[in-house]
Image (tube, rainbow, N blue to C red):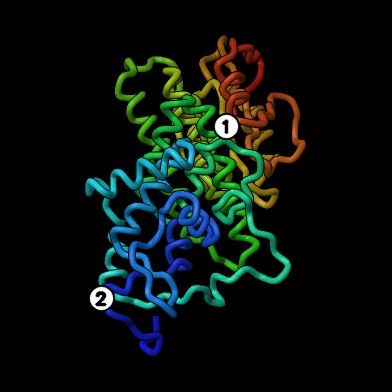
Amino acid sequence: MSAHQGTETADAGVTTGFLARRLGVSPTTLRSWDRRYGLGPAVRADGHHRRWSPDDVAMVQEMCRLTAVGLPPAEAARAAKEAARRGRVAVSPLLAARTRAGVRIPERSAMTAPRPGTVGSRSGTGLPLGDVGQDCRGLARAAVRLDALAVQEQLAAAVRSHGLTRAWEEVMVPTLRAVGRKWESSGDRYVEVEHLLSWHVSATLRHVYVSAAGHAAHATASPVLLACLPDEQHTLPLEALNAALAERRVPVLTLGGAVPPEALMATVRRVGPPAVVLWSQSRSTANPPLARHIAATRWGVRGARTRSQVLLSGPGWGEQSGPGLLRPRHLAEALRLITAPDHRPDDDSAPVT
């Protein structure tokens, strides 16, 4: 912030606009909470915007946390005020630093003002979430206010409550898509929200994988191979499938993003995977000839040669299909196809490619 914007006294606090943006709620929501539940600034100066002290902010943060996990607003407000009275809530370091410094944050700036003709989301996050559950909205709110600990808590709670597959499809994916749409439509705003959310989703998925893999017996079967197409960097869907397979004790080998064709083919020949999952986020990264080549590749000893099932995963594939090519539309379907009884044809007469 430039110097000419100035500072105020050390106990000035932050404005309603700044606090709303930081917490991922609308200023109208904060004012409504104040009117309905008495959840407002303890001190108000005549002729000035309302200022929220660190204690006020801590109380509202607790309100956000409780409503995000599904507590009714009235009950959450009572609990937040009681926790604040007993000194059991703490303000985030960023807000505490801003408030102690007395930094004056304008109620609205050109950066945060809504564009003409746009309609705010009813989700309280500014994100186009649509019809989603409370845990999805709670995750979105935590991400928008850049509350890393709350994001991680929400993700872990979703996995505990729903299991990995439902948490991915009903909580993580809708929130990631909403952030992506907001980023694309708002001139590169919300980039930091998308990065924060993606990082913590990846951390959650890898934690599930590591926990499951640590309890699995040493695998003797060939692993399922997961890889992104060349030039494809979107790895989160493969990380979700990787974790879900590990939970089911299915051996899995994940190569990650942008795997060169030569490396992918070399791995197929070396490992002999029962299934190969190829992820493509956009049509520009889909590679049908490579997929068909993998599906036609036979491997194994003479007399027992076989080939891999190839799963074309991701929106980049469109309606692609063909011999040996499967087209799962979501995580649950991919799991079903991979873990179903193996019907790959043996082909002793075909040359090893």
Residue that protrudes farthest toward the left in the picture: 87
Q: Is residue 194 visible?
A: no
Q: Is residue 201 above or below residue 119?
A: above
The disc label shown at residue 136, or none: none
Determine the secondary structure under disc 1.
strand
Residue with the mark numbered 1: 277
Q: Amino acid at mark 2?
A: Ala
Determine the secondary structure under disc 2.
loop
From mark 1 to mark 2, how far is it between C-alphas?
A: 57 Å
Q: Position of residue 144 (x, y in %)?
A: 48, 55
> Could you tell me which residue is drawn at 51 percent across and 15 percent down?
301
Residue with the mark numbered 2: 10
Q: Position of residue 338 (x, y in %)?
A: 57, 20
Q: Is residue 273 visible?
A: yes
> Could you tell me which residue is drawn at 67 percent across and 31 percent down?
329
- Camera-side residue: 225 or 96? 96
